[in-house]
Image (tube, rainbow, N blue to C red):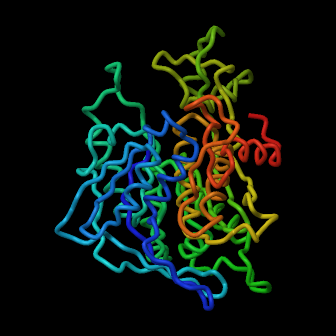
Amino acid sequence: MTNVIKYQDEIEYQPPQPPVRDILGGAGTYSALGARLFSPPPLSNSVGWIIDKGSDFPEALEDLISSWETSVLIRPTPERLTTRGWNGYDEHQNRAFRYMTPKKRLTAEDLTPTLLASRSFHLICSPTRCRELVTEIRARRSGLTSADGSPLPRPIFIWEPVPDLCTPDELLNCTNTLPLIDIISPNHSELAGFMGDSGLDPETGEISTKAIERACEQLLGSMPLQSFAIVVRAGEKGCYLARNGGRKRKVPGKQPKRKKPSALLHGGLQPDTDMEALFAGLLQDPEGMVAREEIEVDPGVERWLPAYHAGSPERVVDPTGGGNTFLGALAVALARGKTLEEAAAWGSVAASFAIEQVGTPILGKAEDSTEEGKEGGETWNGVRVDDRFEEFKNRLAFTS
């Protein structure tokens, strides 16, 4: 479930392509779209988001949103105009953005108990605001329980930093935020901004994959004892995944534990000292018990995944919203227990649907669908999401 706010877009291109207006848009909308693409009914009800509908909100857009069958919360605000954003693209597809009407900030207090119980949260904000939101959301969730009365599981926090504050002056605030979240996902330009770099290859002017890898290594190195991942969205280069590894404890099995000799718990080294057990001291239980079989080394992740349309750039009609759609699918995949790599593949496939046209993709029904409500019975832009994902997974040689 993704909790977001939406606004309408106006998009202005380079001549002679005419501008478009009243397009369903906004980071929150595209994030919800990413989650919805992999959530056919009735699973679509698990996608939660918020719309503050101003006095000028077009009825056609409300009908379009309703057709997605999500758990959207539409709040009429007739005293104000709907938040609108303007997007402008230059000849190199660099995007400029500004608000055309005052934005309405979404806070933790806006979230209903159902939205608060979400398994994942996608936050688009400054480092300081991210820390505030995570703290507030955790505090408000503390008294909530699952349907069976058990405590809510720990949610997944995915932070997308706002471009204006991706600067070297904010780098310390960024690293102070990392311990509170699970994933930070800037695009290549935003990541480079934190490092005081352009992120471009000086010879070709293209996105520099080496600069991305170097910046990720520096961020991970700055927080060696924290567990978090970096997912860098790099346009036509795809996405880069970086996660620090470390030692973690396996789920206890039937293997018997063995007690460490007291000499290994206190005192100096002995000729027969079990060094592996000694350095696994952080994994001891209160009785000083440790089992070699329970120690597992996580090597971490360093991997590039290609963009789905990397081999066919002509399929990319409008990149607006592609990154947010990616993160919406990434969030829902992680909430359903997928690995970081497979979740990123979900994101890449979801983004491919978002950028094939101006605005959002068209929802339809497969002509050969005979099982109403079954996964695969619906299409987006005439294609089953599962079919596209299976093709992409085979391309990546995934085994999961």
**Residue 115, image quadrant:** top left
Q: Position of residue 376 (x, y in %)?
A: 65, 37
Instruction: Tell me what residue is drawn at x 47 percent, y 47 percent.
Output: 68
Which residue is drawn at the image coordinates 69% and 49% (left, top)? 383
Using residue 226 as the reference point, say whether residue 235 is left or right of it.
right
Task: Provide residue 50's location: percent of width, then percent of height.
Answer: 33, 53
362 over 117 or under it: above or below: below
Residue 358 percent coordinates (x, y): 57, 70
Q: Out of 154 and 249, give the one closest to the viewer.
A: 154
- On the rendered image, what quadrant is the C terminus found in? top right
> How many discs appear?
0
In front of the other: 125 or 115: 115
In the picture, the quarter occupied by the N terminus is top left
In the rendered structure, the answer to whether residue 234 lies left or right of residue 151 reads right
Pick the front one: 89 or 113: 89
Residue at x 57% of width, y 84% of height: 13
Q: Quadrant of residue 188?
A: bottom right
Can I make out residue 400 in this image? Answer: yes
Vertical placement of 136 versus 128: above or below?
A: above
Determine the residue positioned at 77% across, 64% down. Answer: 310
Residue 192: quadrant of the picture:
bottom right
Looking at the image, can residue 169 be seen?
A: no
Residue most extreme to the bottom: 15
Q: Is residue 142 above or below residue 149?
A: below
The x, y position of residue 330, in whole percent, is: 57, 48
Q: Left of 254 or right of it: where is 208?
A: right
Along the line of sight, which residue is nearer the eye, 386 or 255? Answer: 386
